[in-house]
Image (cartoon, rainbow, N blue to C red):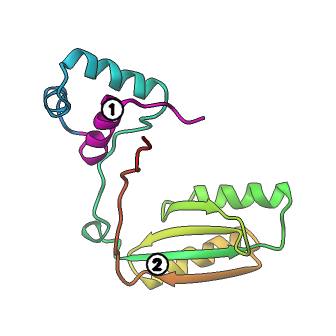
Amino acid sequence: MAAAFDDLDRNILSLLQRDASLSLDEIARKVGASKTPVWNRIRKLRASGVIRAEVALLDPEKVGLESCFFVLIRTAQHDADWLERFLRAVKARPEVVEAHRLAGDIDYILKVQVPNARAYDDFYRSLIRDVSIFNVTSSLSMEVIKSTTELPLPE
């Protein structure tokens, strides 16, 4: 169930999504409120799970992960045992930075961040060694056109 936000919540969340390192003073000044109500709102948003975490976002290329592959997976198996093995295999691999179960012809999509094509091949071989997959299609991202962690906040 989605939380209801007022303008102050939306403004605080927008600022924090852009820069979670802002001080309480800076946030209060930018949203036009005093520190105490802003602090109380932030605590409430954390406690309710709206704010899941505050992290540092790294530049993949600057840490040596220049290749991003999108991996489309179709499976012929849909039993609980296969799913458990698949989820365990995906969650155990740090190269998988996102994984989604899809509706439609493709069952899963993975976003895999690796140094190069050879590292992707090692990842692929390791994955199919751990779990049987009917069909895998991989696409190398040539250019990031848009990448954001900021969510649009509903009115």
Locate residue 30, reporting x and y percent. 16, 34
Locate residue 143, reporting x and y percent. 35, 80
Q: Residues within 10 Å of mark 2 (few under 14, many from 20)?
A: some
Judged left or right of residue 126, residue 120 is left
Residue 119: mark: 2
Task: Specify the principal SS of the magenta part.
Answer: helix
Regarding mark 2 in the picture, which secondary structure is present there?
helix
Q: Quadrant of the C terminus?
A: top left
Residue type for callout 1? Asp
Residue type for callout 2? Ala
Q: Is residue 31 above or below residue 125?
A: above
Identify which residue is drawn at 32% across, 67% down: 60
Q: Earlier in the sequence, mark 1 or mark 2?
A: 1
Residue 95: mark: none
Q: Residues within 10 Å of mark 1 (few under 14, many from 20)?
A: few
Residue in the foreground of this view, choosing between 128 and 155: 155
**Residue extent of the magenta highlight:** 1-20
Locate residue 68, reporting x and y percent. 43, 75
User: In the current view of this chain or complex, which residue is farthest to the top?
Assistant: 36
Q: Is residue 66 above or below residue 60?
A: below
Residue that mark 1 sits on: 7
The image quadrant that residue 144 belongs to is: bottom left
Determine if the magenta segment contains residue 126: no
Determine if the magenta segment contains residue 9: yes
Identify which residue is drawn at 51% across, 32% down: 3
Q: Is residue 27 above or below residue 117?
A: above
Labels 1 and 2 touching (C-beta < 8 A):
no
